Amino acid sequence: MRLGRDILLALIVLAMVVGIGFITPAFVTPQSLAGLFNDTAILIMVALGQMAVILTKCIDLSVGANIALTGVLVALVNAAHPEVPIPLLMLLAATIGLGLGALNGAMVWLVGIPPIVVTLGTLSIYRGLAFIASGGTSIVGRQMSHAFIATPRTEFLGLPLMSWFAIVLVTVFFVGMRITRTGRAFYATGGNPVAAVYAGINVGLTQFTAFSISGAIAGFCGYLWASRFTIAYVDIASGFELQVIAACVIGGISIAGGIGTVQGAVLGALFFGVVSEALPVIHISPFWQLAISGTAILGAVIINSGRERQTGRLILKEASSA
Amino acid sequence: MSDQTIVSHGIPDRPAGRFRWWKRWEVVLFAVALAIFIFNATASPYFLNPYNLSDATFNFTEKAIIGFAMALLIIAGEIDLSVASIIALSSVAMGAAAAAGFGPAILIVIGIAVGIAAGAFNGFVVTWFRIPSIIVTIATMSLFRGIAFVVLGDQVYRHYPASFAYFGQGYVWWVISFEFVLFLALAVVFAVALHWTVFGRHIYTIGNNSVTALFSGVRVDRIRFLLFVLTGMMSGVAAILLTSRIGSTRPTIAMGWELEVITMVVLGGVNILGGSGTIPGVFIAAFVMGLVTFGFGLLNVPGIVQSIFIGSLLIGAIALPIIAGRIAGRWRNA
């Protein structure tokens, strides 16, 4: 049934692309579609991290602020020391992000604060730190080294590296969620935390891991964001966290935890990618984008609501047996 | 570690002594507010000026008015992330009506009616389709603001009737603004509704265990629906005040307010998982946030840096009692 849902979503995304192709054939050329994927790469990657967090019954509202802070920090390092090699800078970005995510996770795991409160707080804190780090100014393209800007755009087998990063990460998640102990623990933790404990899974540690992964991906994307838009300042990726969560929701990842697939998250992100790329092509004002996204999320969850009802019955059984 | 994890996934209520604990929380929060007040008063010579203090109240009254309704909603175990977007929608509707030549009375009716309609929509989707409110309101957050963008685009409504300015700029007496009086009045209304009525007890019951509440004869869905309508309505009221105060409407109006309102409510001691919290707590939290914004503003601390303080306060407010309780527990066991 879940596979059916993913296929349905895939068909919807495909139908949108084909439909727009009929109006504007230029939209469905391989280059154009590759560009669409490249533009959606960051959303796909961050959505995968968010998916891991949501699977464990948590939520990470701080990814946008994480991207801003990491983006500003690596751009500053690059502006001050252009000689630092880019792979090292990427590693630095992912490490900073990992630290920020781990801080979220530690407060959820060790202190026991609800995830929404933790990440609501760190959302403000990380963005505030981005302001302090940047001194309120922007690091613009001419302060960045050539390699800093060029690396994600470097073509490899016909696709920019940015796209390859996303492809690799999707593959890692697709395999990892199935065969690794941690991947299965994400599902078990969210599906039924109490049962997970009795199955020998450290629920808190699993949630901590999910936050760390989400943070590391967001940090890595902080570099990609700064490079892609050739600017880093306090407001980059503002409100991005909600788009990421929306992509997960459209992809059928249950906010109650334990349900969701990698392909769902990718399709949810691609849905947003298609909508935002297609509107200008078919001459609809970009001001429609928010309303369309909102309607799409609402439609997706209402179609999904049959499953949520089942979850409700499950809670009833649990409560009566407890 | 493991048994503690089980506890955190149980009923989100405090064991015995909970009432005393929350009572103490408001006292702590009040002390924080007082400390910030004293700090501000000594740090800036402009702080203790009645006109400046009066200006400072505008920083939080509109958000607090939504916060009261949000507190009820969160206590009942729900959440509304769309409040800022409701403000945008409501403000756009008022702007369109003003452009069509309607007077202030009609504008108020429209502002509140749009808020009620938007809240009713949220409540309907949540209760009818049984979808978690956090998802529904993430969707309507995009939808409502999206409609505002579709209507207004990059344009702006700024031709409001002169008498409309009273709600956001008028003073009832001396430095006491209309907004502040409304804030005080609504605080009393909400405190009475939550703490001294059957309706209020039902909200706590639903938040602690909605299944038990249902089996105890509480009309769970009806109350949930009403709370969403109430939150929408208060967002409409806030939209009137804000629109009147700044005298113009853009689709980006009140952007990001939802997180500030929720921060205020949680800072006020409302359990984000539902089941506990008080209106006096939210009331004091409103002052804490307002005083921080205003005092730091006087010291030329940028708003974004203030948010570091607010964010730390939010996490610290939740973390410190937990850590303190754990240390106390260990000490008692030793």
Image (spheres, rainbow, N blue to C red):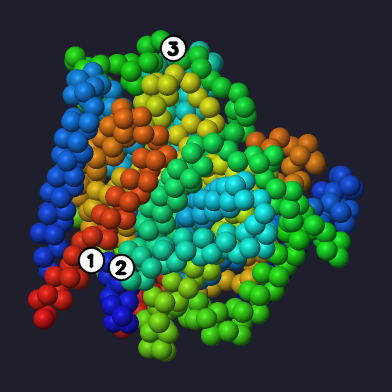
Residue at mark 1 shares a chain with residue at mark 2:
no
- What is the quadrant of the C terminus of chain B in the image? bottom left
**Relative to the observer, which residue lies in front, B117 or B36?**
B36
Three-letter residue code for mark 3:
Pro
Give left or right: position of B26 versus B75.
left
Rendered location of residue B321, percent (x, y): 20, 61
Q: Residue at x 26, y 64 (%)?
A: B208
At mark 2, the secondary structure is helix
- Which chain letter matches label 2? A
Q: Residue at label 3? A: B161
- Sequence order check: which comes first, mark 1 or mark 3? 3
> Can residue A44 be spotted in the picture?
no
- CB within 8 Å, label 1 to label 2: yes
Which of labels 2 and 3 is toward the front? 2
**Relative to the observer, which residue lies in front, B334 or A298?**
B334
- The mark found on residue B19 in the picture is none
- The mark found on residue A111 in the picture is 2
- What is the quadrant of the N terminus of chain B in the image? bottom left
Give left or right: position of B98 versus B297.
right
Three-letter residue code for mark 2:
Val
At mark 1, the secondary structure is helix
Q: What's the distance in space between the residues labelled 2 and 3, CA to CA?
A: 53 Å
Which of labels 1 and 3 is toward the front? 1
* Label 2: how many Cα within 10 Å (few below 14, some 14–19, many 20+): some
- The mark found on residue B323 in the picture is 1
| Quarter of image, res B234 | top left
> Can residue A49 be spotted in the picture?
yes
Three-letter residue code for mark 1:
Ile
At mark 3, the secondary structure is loop
Q: Residue at x 19, y 20 (%)?
A: B50
